[in-house]
Structures are given as structure tokens and as C-alpha cells.
């Protein structure tokens, strides 16, 4: 990972789960890492743990001005952005008949608009520099639908479409990577309020969960490749996850 030295890496959704695990994996690489999330106290704890090459920036990716400020602050502090990871997401699963419209709208705001805001904010800077790497977290739910995942899956299918279109438009200019995690131990899903979902999960197929560090390893693999190598798509499941 010596080629990560002095790279400036922005990670959204960095206060826990895959984002926090990646921050820990990047410690000691010499990369300069900007950790963004809504929970500033969690970010501050992480920066205190990891050291001077890490900066905490409070940002809600569903708010365009906060994403713009995240990008502007990073450039003001470090002069550039080499990698921008749109990782923030929520997953309050529910069945359509429950009509949890507020939750649907929140998923659309964070999972889709948040990715678009990140691309919009960082892309002009990368194009001006003539290089850069944009990463986004989709999901196995972006490949396969399942009961209660209609809206969540739609947001992750949208990320898949956005990122593959971006890849085509930026070929030869900017690297584009989409990560599709399967079952991973994170806080994702802790905002589920549907009793029907919990009942379904009691009888749904059981399989193991990957540690978030497995996704961190995949992210680092993708951003560590030589300049002429683009890792575009990474699907990562526990070995016993059938879907």
C-alpha cells in the first residue's frame, strides 16, 4: 500500500461500519483521510484514535450544500482530492403496504441524491486535475430484489446505473468503482421500524456476516491499482450467502 502515501481520500458514512473499518485500515499508509458523517462525536473519537493524517468533517450527504462544503474544506486543507467514496446509506426496510413514505424519501435523499451530490461536487476538481477516483457503495440489493427491499433495492439499483454510466462517460479520464457488499456486520438496518420485516427475518434464510474489514480490504485493493488499471465492480458476499 506504499502507493497510497499522500493520497487524499474522502469517505462519507465514516462514523461506523465499512467507513470506520476502512479508516483504521488506512492508518499507517501515509494517506490523508477525511472522514465525513452526521455524527461528529463518533468522527472525533475515530480521529483521536487514528492520528494527525485524519480529519473529521460533519456532513449530511442528503444536503447538497454540506457535500459542497466537505469538498471545499478538503481541498482547502490538502490541496486536492484523489479518491472520493460515496459510502453513506440507510436501509429501513419495509413492505409497500405499510406505506412508510417518510422512510422511502429519506432513503432516496441519502442513497441516491447523496451519491449524485458527491459526484457533482468532486468531479469538476478531478477533471481539472486530469485524474481521480470516484467510488460508491451499492449492494447485492442492487442486483437482486427481495420482499421489503423494494425502495432500498431501487436506490441501490440506481447507484449501479449512475456509476456504470459515469464509468462510460469518464473512461480514460477518471477511475470509477462500485462496491456491492452482501451481508456485512454494520449498523445498516438498525433503523428498521417495520414489525413485518422483523417477522420475516425470523424465518428468512440465515447465513454468516462478513466483518466490515473485508469491504475495507476491497476498497483499498481498488484504489491501490496502477494508473492504467481500473477495478470497476466488486461483489463481495459471505461464502454461505446464496443470494
Image (cartoon, rainbow, N blue to C red):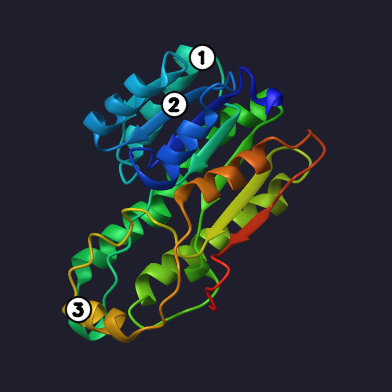
Q: Secondary structure at mark 1?
A: helix
Residue found 56% across the figure and 19% down from its top: 80
Indicate left or right for 98 with 79 as reference: left
Name the residue that disc number 1 marks.
78
Please state which of residues 133 and 186 is positioned toward the viewer in this rendering: 186
Point out residue 30 in the picture as x, y percentages from the top left corner.
58, 18
Q: Quadrant of the N terminus?
A: top right
Local SS, label 3? loop
Dot 2 surroundings within 10 Å: few (below 14), some, or many (20 or more)?
Answer: many
Q: Cβ–Cβ below 8 Å for labels 3 and 2?
A: no
Q: Earlier in the sequence, mark 2 or mark 1?
A: 2
Mark 3 or 2: in front is 2
Quick check: marks 2 and 1 in contact, CB under 8 Å?
Answer: yes
> In x, y percent, where is residue 136?
53, 49
Q: Is residue 34 left or right of residue 108?
A: right
CA–CA distance in space, label 3 to label 2: 37 Å
Disc with the residue nearer the chain's start (1 vs 3): 1
Residue under circle 2?
34
Residue 174 position, x and y percent, is 69, 38
Residue appearing at x 70%, y 23% in the figure: 2
Q: Residues within 10 Å of mark 3 (few under 14, many from 20)?
A: few
Estimate how packed mark 1 is, as few (under 14), some (14 to 19) or many (20 or more) residues with alpha carbons within 10 Å.
Answer: some
Return the residue at label 3. 99
Residue depicted at 38% across the width and 47% down the height? 17
Q: Nearer the viewer, mark 2 or mark 1?
A: 2
Between marks 1 and 3, how big is the CA–CA gap?
45 Å
Q: Would you say the residues marked 1 and 3 are in contact, meaning their CB atoms lie under 8 Å apart?
A: no
Q: CA distance from mark 2 to mark 1?
A: 10 Å
* Observer-nearest of 243 and 118: 243
Q: Earlier in the sequence, mark 3 or mark 2?
A: 2
Amino acid at each position: 500500500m506504499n502507493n497510497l502515501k499522500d493520497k487524499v481520500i474522502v469517505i462519507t458514512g465514516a462514523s461506523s461500519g465499512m467507513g470506520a473499518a476502512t479508516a483504521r485500515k488506512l492508518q499507517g499508509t501515509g494517506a490523508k483521510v477525511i472522514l465525513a458523517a452526521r455524527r461528529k462525536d463518533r468522527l472525533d473519537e475515530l480521529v483521536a484514535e487514528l492520528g494527525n493524517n485524519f480529519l473529521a468533517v460533519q456532513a449530511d450527504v442528503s444536503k447538497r450544500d454540506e457535500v459542497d462544503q466537505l469538498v471545499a474544506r478538503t481541498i482547502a486543507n490538502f490541496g486536492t482530492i484523489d479518491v472520493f467514496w460515496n459510502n453513506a446509506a440507510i436501509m429501513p426496510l419495509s413492505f409497500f403496504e405499510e406505506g412508510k413514505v417518510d422512510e422511502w424519501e429519506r432513503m432516496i435523499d441519502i442513497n441516491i441524491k447523496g451519491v449524485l451530490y458527491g459526484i457533482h461536487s468532486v468531479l469538476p476538481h478531478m477533471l481539472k486535475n486530469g485524474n481521480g477516483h470516484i467510488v460508491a457503495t451499492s449492494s447485492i440489493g442492487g442486483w437482486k430484489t427481495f420482499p421489503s427491499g423494494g425502495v432500498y433495492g431501487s436506490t441501490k439499483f440506481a447507484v449501479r446505473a449512475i456509476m456504470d454510466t459515469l464509468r462510460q462517460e469518464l473512461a480514460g479520464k477518471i477511475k470509477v468503482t462500485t462496491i456491492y457488499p452482501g451481508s456485512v456486520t454494520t449498523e445498516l438496518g438498525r433503523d428498521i421500524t417495520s414489525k413485518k420485516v422483523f417477522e420475516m427475518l425470523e424465518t428468512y434464510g440465515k447465513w454468516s456476516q462478513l466483518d466490515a474489514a473485508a469491504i475495507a480490504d476491497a476498497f483499498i485493493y481498488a484504489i491501490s491499482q496502477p494508473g492504467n488499471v481500473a477495478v470497476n465492480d466488486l461483489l463481495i458476499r459471505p461464502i454461505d450467502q446464496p443470494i
